[in-house]
Amino acid sequence: MSALTWAVAAVVTDPSGRVLLCRQSGGGRRWALPGGRLRRDESPPAAACREIRAETGWEVDLVDLVGLYRLGDPAAPPPPAGRCGALPDVLVHVFRARVVAGAPAGAPAGGCQLDWHPPDALPEALTPTTRAAVADALAGRSGVLCETTRGRDDVGPAGAAAPPEQRAGGELGTLR
């Protein structure tokens, strides 16, 4: 059995360009992108639309794939050949999305505080993975491949993104 968790998230914007973020009630109380895990036999785009609707109540149109963001533990020993790393090893498909209507289509899930944020006034308490994905999405990047790591103070699927100079690899922002 693989230790890899497949997940989806999206940088959801409204017509004024604000970004929708969710602050979970548990863990480190950081803001993150809406999303969740893929179900068996589900495509990442279908999972993203389902998870965003369930978590936020908003119907979204996916615009494109910003990139793949892998969260791992740098202190974990290397995995055996053909195996994923130690838990948590999460691969997140991050999409760029926009809301379909002027109001949510349903009620958001409990345990998630939702708020819209202007891109130039994002909260400080963002997961580093969220910070990297939002920066990439708002810069218009697509095809990003990014490794993020869990910091000592991170709880849940949050991680410290590599500095932008390490993530930059041409126009795709590929980690080298």
Image (tube, grey):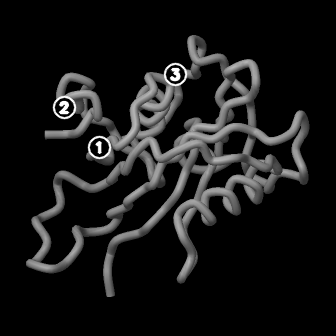
Residue linked to disc 2: 169
Residue 53 spot, x, y in % from top left: 76, 55
Say what amino acid the circle numbered 1 marks: Cys
Foreground residue, 68 or 1?
68
Confirm or deny contact between disc 3 and disc 1 (CB under 8 A): no
Mark 3 or mark 1: whose residue is earlier in sequence: 3
Residue linked to disc 3: 124
From mark 3 to mark 1, how far is it between C-alphas?
A: 21 Å
Q: Nearer the viewer, mark 3 or mark 2?
A: 2
At numbered mark 3, what does the secondary structure look like: helix, strand or loop? Answer: loop
In the rendered view, tell whether residue 157 sits above or below residue 144.
below
- Which mark is drawn over residue 138? none
- In screen coordinates, is 23 left or right of 134? right
Which residue is found at the position 52% from the left and 21% from the top? 124
Q: Nearer the viewer, mark 1 or mark 2?
A: 2
Foreground residue, 124 or 58?
58
